[in-house]
Image (cartoon, rainbow, N blue to C red):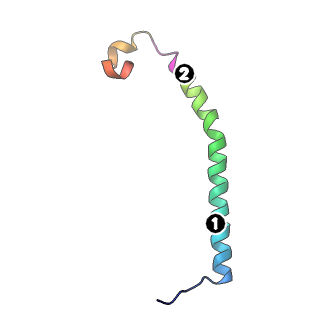
Amino acid sequence: MKHRSLSPRARALVTFLGTVVLALLASMALLTPDVAGPAVDSLTALPSGLDQILPVGASK
């Protein structure tokens, strides 16, 4: 089986796209605590009658 290598231009493009993907993943990882923190804090402020609406397994 013959091994085909990427041209220098294609290799540079793949490297660039990989760098962009890693940068996006890193920025999303940094934003996650900012989104998750307020969402968890809002769960403590649920209305008192909500346990009657939700199924028994979901409220515990």
Q: Position of residue 50 (x, y in %)?
A: 39, 14
Mark seen at residue 9: none
Majority secondary structure of the magenta segment?
Answer: loop
Front residue of 57/54: it is 57
Location of residue 23 by image quarter = bottom right
Q: Is residue 51 left or right of residue 15?
A: left
Q: Position of residue 26 (x, y in %)?
A: 66, 49
Mark 2 lies on residue = 42
Front residue of 35/7: it is 7
Q: Secondary structure at mark 2?
A: helix
Q: Which residues are magenta?
A: 43-47
Q: Residue reaching furthest front?
A: 1
Asked if 2 appears above or below 21 in the picture, the reply is below
Q: Position of residue 16 (x, y in %)?
A: 68, 68
Mark 1 lies on residue = 17
| Of pointers 1 and 2, the one earlier in the residue sequence | 1
> Disc 1 marks which amino acid?
Leu
Location of residue 4 by image quarter = bottom right
